Amino acid sequence: MSTWLSESPLGDDEYGAATTSDFLGTWELTNVGEPNQGQLFFHVQGRWEYGPPGPETLGPINLGTLVGTANTFGEYVPTFLLRNLYWQQGSQEAGWVFRAGKITPDATMSTSAHIAAPLTFVTIAGTGPFANALTDSGLGIVATWFVNDRFKVMGLVSDANADRFNFGDITEGDFYSAVEFAYKFAPRTEKAGYSKLALWHTDPTKDGEPVNGHIGGQGGYGFFIKHEQELTDDGRAVALFRYGKSYNDSALYNYQFGAHFFLYNPTKSGIQNDLLAVAVNWAQANVSGARLESDFEIFYRFPMFPKVDVTLHYQSIFNLALDPDNDHAAAFSIRLRTTF
C-alpha cells in the first residue's frame, strides 16, 4: 500500500509505503466434519515499510490526524509475529462456538464483512471500533451462542496486558471483558450481516501504559453500536452506521461516529467483484487539546488480474485533531491485494 498527503505541515514526509502479509491455517483434530468439530487455528502476520514513515504513521506524524490515514499498515520489529493461536470448538450449525488461546479482540468485536482494512476503507476511524478500549492480541477466551438464525450472543475475556509480540502478562490479573448482542434486522439475502451492541469494561494495565486501543492505560468502560442494513433485494447496496462512547479516558476515542455506504458491482458490466463505497467519520480523540476531527472517504476496488485486486482511495480530512492551524488536508492511497 502507498499513501500520498496533500501537505506535510508537521513533518518532512508526504509519502509512505508498506506491505502486510498474513498466513492463516487450521488443523482439524477432533469430530472432523461434524458441527462440533475441534480445530487449531494459527495466524502469522508480517509488516514492513519502504522508508519511514509508513502509511499508518504518515498522517498522525505529518498532518496531526487522529482519524488516521492507514490502519494496520505499520511495520513490525521483528517483521513477523504470531497474532493468533487458539483452539476452536463448535460452529453456527452446532449453535455454539468456543475459542481459547491467543486471540485478537479488535478482529472479534463489532466486526463487519463490509469493513476491513485490507479490503475496504483504510483509515483508523473508518475501520476500527476504537471508542472501545480494545486490548492487544493475547491470551483470552471467546464464547458465542447462536440463539437462532438471526440472533447471537458473544462473550469475551482477554488479558488487559496483552502484547502481540509475546504472550502478555495474564498473571497480573488485569482483564478486558465484553459482551456483544448481534441481530439481523430485516435481512434481504443470506449474506445479510448482524447489527451489534457491545458493552465492555477494562482493568488498568499493570504499568498504566497504552495497549492497542486501550490508549489511556487506566480502567474504563463503554459501549459500541453497529447497524448494517441491506438496501436492495440483491444485497448489492448496503448502509452501515457505527457509534461508540468510552468513559474514563480509557480508549483511543472518547467517542466516534461513522456512516458508510457500499455498492457492489456498481456498473453491472463485465467487471465482476468490484466495489464503490463512501463514508464519513467523526472522532473525538483521547488526547489533551485535540479537536473534533472528521473525514470523508471514497474508494473503488476492482480486480486487475485473477486474485489480484486494486483499490483507489481518497480521503478529505477536516479540523486536524493535533494541528489547530490546519482545517483541511487530503490523502490519496493505492492498495494491491492478492490471495493464494
Image (tube, helix red, strand yellow):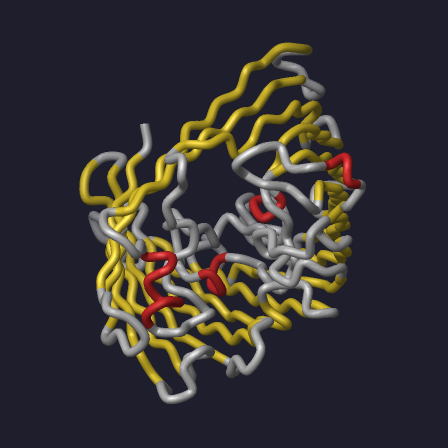
Asked if residue 225 is positioned above or below residue 167 in the image, the reply reads below
Residue at 68%, 56% in the rendered image? 208
From the viewer's perspective, is residue 307 above or below residue 280?
A: above
Front-most of residues 306 and 118:
118
Task: In the displayed orientation, state which residue is furthest to the front.
Answer: 207
Across and down, in percent, residue 154 comes to 74, 44
> Residue 313 occupies which quadrant of the picture?
bottom left
Q: In the rendered image, is residue 302 in sight? A: no
What x and y, as percent, mark residue 182?
70, 51
Is residue 193 positioned above or below 339 on the image? below
Drawn side of residue 112 relative to residue 327, left or right: right
Q: Residue at x 23, y 35 (%)?
A: 306
- Residue at image point 40% right, 35% down: 78
Q: Is residue 44 visible?
A: yes
In terms of depth relative to the viewer, which is nearer, 158 or 301?
A: 158
Q: Is residue 84 left or right of residue 13?
A: right
Residue 41, percent from left and from top: 56, 24
Classify residue 53 as left or right of residue 36: left
Question: In the rendering, at what x and y percent does residue 114 appear?
Answer: 47, 53
Image quadrant assignment for residue 104: top right
> Which quarter of the image is occupied by the C terminus?
top left
How many numbered callouts?
Answer: 0
**Location of residue 309 with respect to 237 vertically, above or below:** above
Residue at (57, 52) in percent of width and height: 212
